[in-house]
Amino acid sequence: MSNPFMPGNGIEPRYLAGRDEYVELFTKSLKSFEDGLPRNTVVSGLRGTGKTVLLRRFKIIAESRGWLTVEREFNERFSEEEVFAEALVGDIISKATEVSIIQKAKQFGKRIGDILKPEELTAYGISYKPYYKGKKQLLEDHLKEMLVKNWEVFKKAGKKGVVFLYDEFHTVKDAKDKKSFPLASLLGAISYAQRNGCKYYLCIGGLPIIMTNLKTAKTYTERMFELREAGNLEPTEAEQAIVNTLKSSEYEFEQDLVNKMISETRGYPYFIQFYGYFTIENTSKKKLTLSDFTKIREKLLKELDKNFFVDRLNLASGKEKQILFAMAKIGESDIETSKIKSASRMDKHVMLELIKRLIEKGLIYRSDRGKYGFSLPLFRDFLLRAR
Ligand SMILES: Nc1ncnc2c1ncn2[C@@H]1O[C@H](COP(=O)(O)OP(=O)(O)O)[C@@H](O)[C@H]1O
Ligand SMILES: [Mg+2]
């Protein structure tokens, strides 16, 4: 019988623990948008806390209520306006084409999968224009036009609306110096479309820095989005994640082992899956005890370091690593720059530059003004082990 734990990236767990409230709130937000009040959601959290998995759950809910969904994983490349415009407009057009083809197929018994030709797009009421920055049109205006003009297509197809499920969206940032404003343009265009009765729901996920990016882009984002923080699971939720996952299998963990897993993983979803998976793979019993786990614990930590932490640490240069080790000595989150400075014995400007680069590499994040924390759960413990 197979191992019921699923450590991985965006892989649906057998049992989704501790997210009932978020799922319910998302359903409610869809309902209220259907009744006319625009809603948007941002899912923020560290790596491996279950953001992607939650977005996928949202997708299923939205589709079951008659919404169309668009999924996309972003990266730094999309911070360029033209690339961003192509992605967003491409998503709108491909969805519009999809519903049009389905309608056409229904009407004429055509085979779904026939692609609409560009000249056919207009016949179906689909508007498409590529975006060229050189043409002096503002990205925001371009997006507004594409969103509003294509709305009729979705409405005619009897769809409730379109949910954009945009993951890793913290990578999309505005840059004043490059006159590049993908984020502000999107927020402005979506708000405009929503005010004009178009039901486009923006649901984005990303690392905690996403909140700062949003606020910097447009001051009204607090009113535009509801924030769902994907964090570590509470002990009772972590217990459910373990126990309910095991229920679908022939394995059993004694209570002491469950408790040990809860405390060592501190409820971080990825680690729960990893601990469970590894423990089962490395013992040959069906009923596992705490002492079975204790025997393989060293090996598990080594594997976890190898699989998860070492590659991440090696993203950092020698000097950047010094900052990380200095931070680890101090604490886990809300680490003040003054303390990092004295622990690392570095020049302030050098230190700030290194911090900036570590943020860009996704290893640390700004938790507050002048305060920083590690983006990876349990990274501090690893650094203390690795020293
Ligand atoms: N609520 C949850 N309960 C149990 N396991 C979860 C939960 N959320 C995520 N996981 C598991 O944790 C791992 C990381 O999830 P993922 O969605 O990729 O995280 P993120 O997108 O935040 O980096 C996956 O193996 C997934 O199956
Ligand atoms: Mg993810």
Image (tube, rainbow, N blue to C red):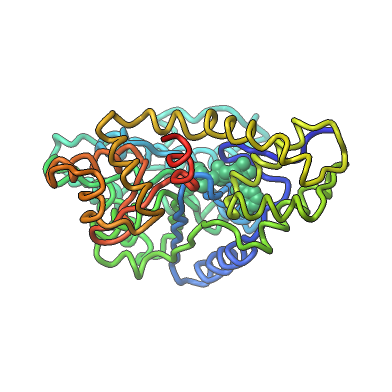
- Residue 56: image x %, image y %? 58, 47
Q: Is residue 223 visible?
A: yes
Quadrant placement of the N terminus: top right
Image: 99 above or below 160: above
Image: 30 above or below 144: below
- Residue 232: image x %, image y %? 55, 56
Q: Residue at x 23, y 58 (%)?
A: 370
Q: Is residue 23 left or right of residue 319?
A: right
User: Of residues 374 and 113, which is closer to you in this image?
Assistant: 374
Q: Is residue 59 visible?
A: no
Image: 341 above or below 240: above
User: Of residues 200 and 44, which is closer to you in this image?
Assistant: 44
- Residue 128: image x %, image y %? 35, 38
> How many marks are shown on the rendered structure?
0
Quadrant of residue 276 within the rendered picture: top right
Q: Is residue 67 left or right of residue 367?
A: right
- Residue 45: image x %, image y %? 46, 53
